[in-house]
Image (cartoon, rainbow, N blue to C red):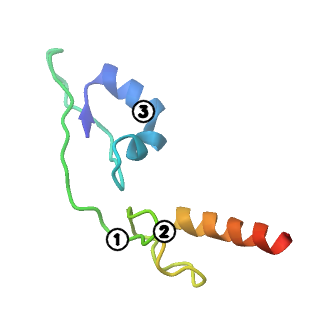
Amino acid sequence: MAAPDQLFAVLERHRDQLRYLFIVSDVVLEKSPASNGDAGLIITVNRAPGEKCERCWNYSTHVGEDKTYPTVCERCSAVLSEIEATTRAR
């Protein structure tokens, strides 16, 4: 995604949440090349790298890194570990 300066500043503040807002696996945010002020947002869609997480269906290059939960991404792995720890504590 390439945005003109003014819009880039707004998107940059929310960079970590953009993938959830757009319901995609990843967002790459860049500044648009300089223009005369009438440039809009440029969105390019590509296939995400990595494997599909069985739990959230997002693609991540970290699927398979956790030996306990080899079919999920890093985010889901952390959640599943927390659920398991809570269950054991009861």
Callout 1: SS? loop
* Of pointers 3 and 1, the one earlier in the residue sequence: 3
Q: Nearer the viewer, residue 78 or 2?
A: 78
**The N terminus lies in quadrant:** top left
Rendered image: mark on residue 50: 1
**The C terminus lies in quadrant:** bottom right
Nearer the viewer's eye, disc 2 or disc 3?
2
Residue 10, picture quadrant: top left
Q: Is residue 27 above or below residue 36?
A: below
| Mark 2 burial class by Cα count in 10 Å: few <14, some 14-19, many 20+ | many
The answer to the question of whether label 1 and label 2 lie on touching residues, with beta carbons closer than 8 A, is: no
- Please provide percent x and percent y for residue 69: 56, 79
**Residue named by callout 3:** 12
**Residue named by callout 2:** 73
Residue 2, picture quadrant: top left
* Of pointers 2 and 3, the one earlier in the residue sequence: 3
* Of pointers 1 and 2, the one earlier in the residue sequence: 1
